[in-house]
Image (cartoon, coloured by chain):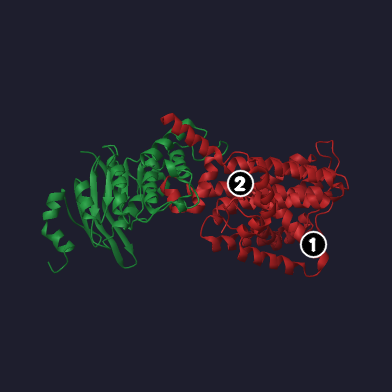
Chain colours: A red, B green
Amino acid sequence: MTTNVQSDVAYHARQHGRWHWSEFAYWIAVLAVGLAFPSRYLIMTEIVRLALFALSLDLILGYAGIVSLGHAAFFGVGAYCAGLLSAHGLIDEPLLALIVSGVAAMVLGFVTSFLVIRGADLTRLMVTLGIALLLEALAERFSNITGGTDGLQGIDIKPLLGLFEFDMFGRTGFFYALAVLFVLFLLARRIVHSPFGLSLRAIKNNPLRAAAIGIPVNRRLIAIYTVAAFYAGIAGALFTQTTALASLDVFAFDKSADLMLVLVIGGAGYLYGGLIGALVFRMLQEVFQTITPQYWMFWIGLVLVVIVLVGRQRIHAAALFVPNLILKQLAGRKAVVALSDNEAP
Amino acid sequence: MSIALETRNLEKHFGGLRVTRDLSLKIATGARHALIGPNGAGKTTVINQLTGVLNPTSGRILLEGTDITDLPVHKRVLRGLSRTFQINQLYPDLTPLETIGLAVSERLGRGGDWWRRMGTRDDVNAEIADTLGRFRLLDVMNDRTSTLPYGKQRLLEIAVAIAAKPRVLLLDEPAAGVPEGERKDILAAVSALPRDVTVLLIEHDMDLVFSFADRISVLVSGALLVEGPPDEVARDPQVKAVYLGEAA
């Protein structure tokens, strides 16, 4: 009897971390799309980078409840680090340079985390925003190193693993970025379904109670902020490596702000929000730019307001209405696709 | 007689307000000690200082002879001091299973594991099953906490505190707001605690206090008024005056 209950508990405790068939379907679809549109590698690479960047923000916002308007700081450090490593020929292997750039952003994340974990949401918004602005100004001031507004000159990305040349169609770049995203996604998935990841959700839900069961709240927040900085740094380095560009706008405020939009569109706190949000955001941007090249931000703004007012739940329900209707006919009620209701406020 | 929890000349000021006045308490190991007092006597402020949510203005706090005054909240918990809150402090989006699982993981020092999935350690699972069973929460273990009826949430609040396997447990009005019918579950859970666990109960309900406590401290305006066994405290004229109103 007792062992029955125990195995029951074990089963349900693992339930969250189990792979759902829709997740397999998602990744297979991503790969299929990648193979199906060889003429669209550049924009697809852009989406993958944005997805990784959004995944980074989701780790701190969706799980630990840390709001940030300056996540571009880490993206920028990763981007410049990868650029400098290449321009000065310090590390020729892109993969190694990528990891080093991620670690550079991670160090910055660790150092600034002590400022960020203090205070409440508004303080955090201002501190993160301030740090990103500081770095942008520094990059401009030391233009002898960063190339200033002209961007960093002389970036020449060597073949990946010495084998795969970064071609002008962006094929190598795309599959490289996708592979990096997938590996880091697996790692993030592991982290959020661990006791550590659960303790982050506990802290987000109720920091007072979290401390009262023995969770070292500050240490956990520092840890996840540092990890998220690593992710953002990798996204930035991918940007430099796949475009051979690094300029001041890697630190720009709109970068951080767009990222928030991506998560608002996709939903925070279930990891796929950033991935789906990046795709939808970039597609919307594309569509609106064709309709009204000058005023596409108007439409993005409108979409944002509608999402927040109508609520993502209802939009998801509406979008999934027809597919679910078909699924219900085919496979019964249990097969309907439901998105996680665990979303950011 | 060994002392589980002790305060020495504890003082807490909020601006010019003295909320705790020169409070020296000694709570014996294994005691069922109650801290009572009228509204605004500063009972919860005392609990918050004991657990580290508030820092005392002056004075020391000792847990089993060790000074813990400067330790942060979570370190006190790991040393065996656990509490429940007067108003439920739970995780609305988490399930009872996850809530208890976290408490057990942290106590066993496995809470920081980031490479291992939840539910993969037998010792943790066994304890979760045991705790949920004892508090009759097994049937709702996969429901979101925010959807549970109040009585169940209250049970969970106490279950979390006990899952930390405290040596000293602070109960801040455990039965507050719980309907008569569900009270017995909570009382049963509290009386089923091992005898060597020291319990400090803060309570308004005098029936509960007198049926539970073997020693009572009466707090008035932040200072200790009387301390003694229940029958002595019940007979005390000062206590009567406080509880029956100034008119008496």
Location of the N terminus of chain A (image quadrant) = top left
Residue type, mark 1 in image: Val
B160 sits left or right of A111 in the view: left
User: Where does the image place residue A225, in percent across and percent down from the top left?
Assistant: 59, 50
User: Where does the image place residue B146, in percent across and percent down from the top left?
Assistant: 46, 53
Residue at image point 41% right, 31% down: A2
The residue that label 1 is drawn on is A287
Q: Quadrant of residue B40?
A: bottom left
How many residues crowd mark 1 within 10 Å: few (<14), some (14–19), many (20+)?
Answer: some
Q: Mark 1 lies on which chain?
A: A
Q: Which chain carries label 2?
A: A
Query: Can I make out residue A77 in this image?
Result: no
Same chain for labels 2 and 1? Say yes or no.
Answer: yes
The residue that label 2 is drawn on is A333
Q: How far apart are marks 2 and 1 (CA)?
A: 35 Å
Name the front one of labels 2 and 1: 2
Residue type, mark 2 in image: Arg
Location of the C terminus of chain A (image quadrant) = bottom right
Residue at image point 75% right, 60% down: A284
